[in-house]
Amino acid sequence: MTTNTGKVRTIQTTMVLAGLFSLVASAGKMQTPSVMNKTEPLPRDLEIQLALSALPPHLRDNATVYVLNPAKGFEIARKGTNGFHAFVARTGDDTFRGSWPLTEYRSDILYPIAFDQAGTKAQMRVFFDAAAMQAAGTPPGELKRIIQQRYKAGFYKAPERAGIAYMLAPVLRTYFDPDDSSRVITINFPHVMYYAPDISNEDIGGGTLGGMDPFVILRGHHGYMIQALGLTERAAVNREYQDMLARLCNIQPVWCLPKEQGQ
């Protein structure tokens, strides 16, 4: 006859074994070559230059700069003092929009961005969490599910105040309309982003990507209002970073800027 104490011990043992089996199975899944991180690091000096190009000149010298270690996530390359944080994401926050499946970690995403203090505490966490989980071997589909659940549960808070994120770099490769599809583009679109929680494009009478009128992206608690640089300012950015652009173009042809009409 089995006592109640014996039953409890049997149940506990079964639960422990099940938990161990689950961990082993999960570890095996995490280490499968098909889901391992394949991101190739940029040359360190190039990555730092590209990260800082997201900022206006007067903020670059005293900003905190990060580089991506594909085996661990983002690491501080230089600690700053002005409250701005710059880095180059290889998996951006827009990766987690929409219902389209994330089936692989792309090696061609290039997302230079810099946050002020408010954005560092809120928006930036998504980028860093994603990089760390990707480095740990989390499968792409699982990573998207986790991040989306965190957004839904309120784990990632909206910025606590009005603020700004800079994306003034001369090159950006990311999703064209992540709410709709996984289509990726390379663009020359230096711009600034103001935190715009729960504001729609209609609310501001917004324009569209590529135009000069402000518009809203990633609508929701973590939305942004985008303002592009003018054509004259954009041309100046391109001239300043022509050598950097040439290096990136040599590394991956998809990072070459598209030719302007008439060129």
Image (cartoon, rainbow, N blue to C red):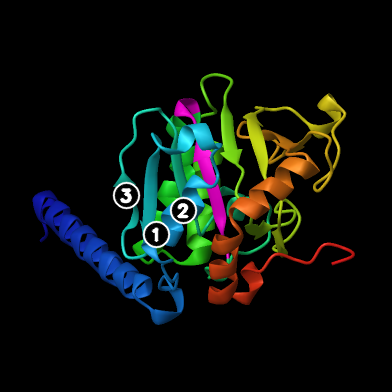
Marks 2 and 1: CB-CB under 8 Å? yes
- Whether residue 146 is visible: no
Q: Quick one: which residue is furthest to the top in this view?
A: 161
Marks 2 and 3: CB-CB under 8 Å? no
The region drawn magenta spans: 109-118
User: What residue is pinned by disc 3?
Assistant: 77
Q: Earlier in the sequence, mark 2 or mark 3?
A: 2
Residue 118: where, in percent of width, then height? 48, 26
Residue 23: where, in percent of width, then height? 27, 65
Residue 135, located in which quarter of the rendered image? Answer: bottom left
Q: Is residue 30 above or below residue 123?
A: below
User: What residue is pinned by disc 2?
Assistant: 49
Q: CA distance from mark 2 to mark 3?
A: 11 Å
- Locate the C terminus by quadrant: bottom right
Q: Nearer the viewer, residue 130 or 145?
A: 130
Amino acid, disc 2: Gln
Q: Which mark is residue 45?
A: 1
